[in-house]
Image: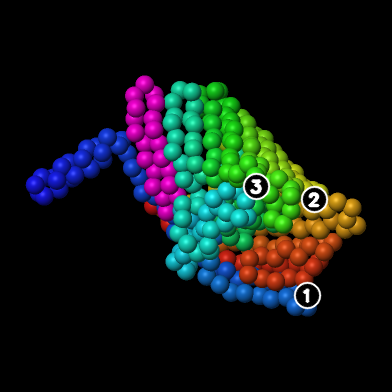
Amino acid sequence: MKKYLITLAAASAAGGALAQSSVTLFGVVDAAVTYTRGSGDGSAHKTQLTNSGNMFSRLGFRGTEDLGGGYSANFWMEMGLQNDSGTGFPSNSNNQASGNGPAGVLSFNRRSTVSLAGPFGEVRLGRDYVPAFWNTAIFDPFGTGGGIGANQIYFSGLGGLVAPTGTRASNSIGYFLPANLGGFYGQVMYAMGENDSNALLPGTRVPSKHDGEHTGARFGYQSGGLHVAIATGRTRYASGDLRVTNLGAAYSFGPSLMNLKLTSELYKESKGSTDAKGVLVGFQLPIGPGEIKASYARYKLEPANAVREPTSSKLAIGYVHNLSRRSALYGTLARISNRNGAAQALAGAITMPGRSSSGIELGMRHMF
């Protein structure tokens, strides 16, 4: 009887595997030696082995099952990695600071979705990119890497890296338009904060039942060398909503201009009574087996009734040398300049208000 149960269980598992059209293990391992420094009295420099300088390190599983008639069921589970130390990244359970997980744990913090796709488009459920982040990821020459060349607007902004919904939202329902719309595309998202109806801000009588609710949309057009998209998002908080709107545009020239690609992003955001604006311009230029890329970004905070508006700008230039389709070596130089009390510094460095920070990194990336 015991052997029969074991055989039956094995057969059931095999049948389930055969029903799945495909399952893929994928990932990125990226590490770099990075030196950054600040300036002014009390500044500090740092040398470190970092991760994700060219692309964020990750490990993921994705799969799809063909349902027939152009329909498919899909899943995607992806976690971020800090391969320099063997640790992971926490996720966020409710799009609020209270939902942050413990540091260093392995979790499917990047994406965790199940979806149904077909001629109508795709409906996704779970944790996914918010629409406004896509423009930052696509129109920045340095992409979604976390190195010293990464987007100054995203890494220092109100709705950037540190915001619970600056990159992704949990508990989301998303819809993507079908791909056959003559170059037009779009998505909408609604994500829940999942607070009970009696929720209050701690120590107050202020209702907070809508905290963490996110709504967003993105629409774009891509054809030939032209690509343009506009996106917006709002996350509700009783202490002051977070709003982000950005416009991205890029144009890729033909072989006569060495396939040069120019990129740009305009960015506007607010959180409570503080507004902010940003702009980024850049280019990507293929050179043999590699690519030169550069960007200039400027970000300004506009606090209500403030006399000074802290402003920072970053200039970055890098080169990626592709050893193969999967492996690459890269190097980046970057410098941040600060004004009006801003004190932004490259990762690991400390700089004084109104002073600058600079750095260099050399690394390797492998995709699988």
Write down the region rendered in magenta. Answer: 59-78
Q: Is residue 327 left or right of residue 356?
A: left
Mark 1 or 3, which is nearer the eye?
3
Q: Residue at x 62, y 74 (%)?
A: 46
List the residue tagged with mark 1: 40
- Asked if the residue at tag 3 contacts the one at tag 2, i.e. Cβ–Cβ closer than 8 Å, the answer is no
Query: What is the x, y in percent for residue 339?
Result: 82, 61
Q: Is residue 107 at all visible to an observer of this figure?
A: yes
Q: Is residue 218 magenta?
A: no
Query: What is the x, y in percent for residue 64?
Result: 37, 36
Q: Which mark is residue 274?
A: 2
List the residue tagged with mark 3: 199
- Asked if the residue at tag 2 contacts the one at tag 1, i.e. Cβ–Cβ closer than 8 Å, the answer is no
Q: Earlier in the sequence, mark 1 or mark 2?
A: 1
Q: Earlier in the sequence, mark 1 or mark 3?
A: 1
In the displayed orientation, state which residue is furthest to the bottom: 41
Name the kind of residue labelled 3 in the image.
Ala
